[in-house]
Every structure is written in structure tokens, then in C-alpha cells.
Image (cartoon, rainbow, N blue to C red):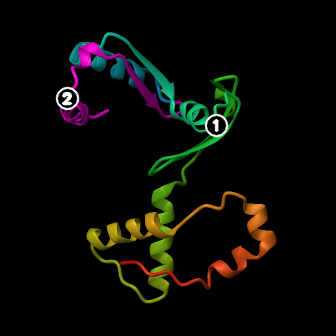
């Protein structure tokens, strides 16, 4: 957790942290010393009255579906986790970590575009590819249906413009 982000967020929200309990989320398999450090910062620096640390995938499962049992894919910029959850608890021994995430998709899109003749030489141009991905890419909600209806076969021929 970056202190300046917390301080800026609290200032922008115009709240006194000592008056509000805090819910922090963490990546699966986050080492105990990291959690202890977050706790120390929240209590000693921000004087929060109470806090809880929860795994992001558990919070996401509950807030998006109301379910406490399921499997979540938690993908950050550089790593993804597949998190099985049973009755609100992550099954730690069954969590899978993949060193494949959003950044890899951006690099793959850059590779495809480079093969088609586009050049990416500066970090600003690379950031543009990241924004293209965010604006134009999607994940099928029902992959099987997409395959059955032939949408997947035709998707590469659909032309989309990026401005």
C-alpha cells in the first residue's frame, strides 16, 4: 500500500480516518508480514478505529453475485490467481497462481499490431495500446454460446476503430 495514495484518497474524500472503520483487500497468498505492515500503517498512521483485511476474490464473489461459494479469477497487471472459495473462505491449498495477466494481453496485442505493420517505440505509444485494449477488447460472458453461434469465427473480421 502506498502511503501517499491513502493520504490523497482520504483528503479527496474529506473524511477523518479515525472516525471510520476500514476494509482492505489483498491478493490471495499475500505473505503475513505484508498484512501485518498494512495493519500497522492503518492503526498507527491513520488511527482507524477498526479494520478488516479480506482476499479480493472473496469480496468480489460476494458483491457481484451474493454467493459465498464459487471460483474466482483474480487478475492484476502482472499475475492472475484462480481462487476456489467455499462458504466465504478461500481454499488456500487449491489456489493457482499464473504469471499471466493484463500486461501480457497488452503485449500480445502489440505483437499482433506490430505484425500488421504498426510500430511501438515509446512508452506513450505502448500506453495507447493499453487504452485500445481497454476500449475494444471484451470477454465472452458465454463462451460456448459464442462458439455455437459463430460469433467467435466472425469476430476477427469485425473492424473496429480506435480514436
The one nearer the camera, 153 or 65, is 65
* Residue at (28, 68) in percent of width and height: 123
* Residue at (41, 26) in percent of width and height: 24
Query: In the displayed structure, would residue 156 be above or below residue 18?
Result: below
Query: In the displayed structure, would residue 52 be above or below residue 116?
Result: above
Side (left or right) of 99 relative to 65: left
Residue 11 belongs to the span the image colors magenta = yes
Task: Report the residue that reaches farthest toward the right.
Answer: 148
* Residue at (39, 25) in percent of width and height: 34
Residue 14: give its label.
2
The one nearer the camera, 128 or 40, is 128
Task: Report the residue that reaches farthest toward the bottom.
Answer: 117
* Inter-mark Cα distance, 2 to 1: 31 Å
Quarter of image, res 90: top right
Would you name the residue on which mark 1 appears? 65
Assess disc 2: are there few (<14), some (14-19) or many (≥20) residues with their C-alpha within 10 Å of its C-alpha: few
* Magenta part of the chain: 1-29
Q: Is mark 2 on a helix, strand or loop?
A: loop
Side (left or right) of 82 relative to 119: right
Image quarter of the N terminus: top left
Side (left or right) of 153 relative to 32: right
Q: Of the two numbered discs 2 and 1 on the same chain, state the one appearing first in sequence.
A: 2
* Residue at (73, 61) in percent of width and height: 143
The one nearer the camera, 52 or 142, is 142
Residue 97 position within the rendered picture, expressed as x and y whole percent measured from the top left: 59, 42
Q: Is mark 1 on a helix, strand or loop?
A: helix
Q: How many marks?
A: 2
Residue 70 belongs to the span the image colors magenta = no
Amino acid at each position: 500500500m502506498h502511503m501517499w495514495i491513502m493520504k490523497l484518497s482520504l483528503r479527496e474524500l474529506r473524511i477523518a480516518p479515525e472516525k471510520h472503520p476500514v476494509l482492505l483487500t489483498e491478493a490471495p497468498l499475500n505473505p503475513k508480514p505484508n498484512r501485518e505492515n498494512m495493519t500497522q500503517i492503518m492503526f498507527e498512521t491513520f488511527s482507524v478505529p477498526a479494520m478488516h483485511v479480506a482476499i479480493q476474490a472473496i469480496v468480489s464473489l460476494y458483491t457481484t453475485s451474493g454467493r459465498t461459494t464459487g471460483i474466482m479469477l483474480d487478475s492484476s497487471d502482472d499475475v492472475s490467481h484462480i481462487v476456489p472459495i467455499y462458504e466465504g473462505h478461500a481454499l488456500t491449498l487449491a489456489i493457482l497462481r499464473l504469471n499471466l495477466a493484463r500486461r501480457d494481453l497488452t503485449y500480445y496485442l502489440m505483437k499482433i499490431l506490430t505484425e500488421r505493420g504498426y510500430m511501438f517505440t515509446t512508452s506513450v505509444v505502448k500506453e495507447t495500446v493499453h487504452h485500445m485494449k481497454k476500449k475494444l477488447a471484451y470477454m465472452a460472458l458465454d463462451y460456448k454460446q459464442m462458439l455455437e453461434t459463430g460469433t467467435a469465427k466472425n469476430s476477427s473480421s469485425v473492424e473496429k476503430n480506435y480514436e
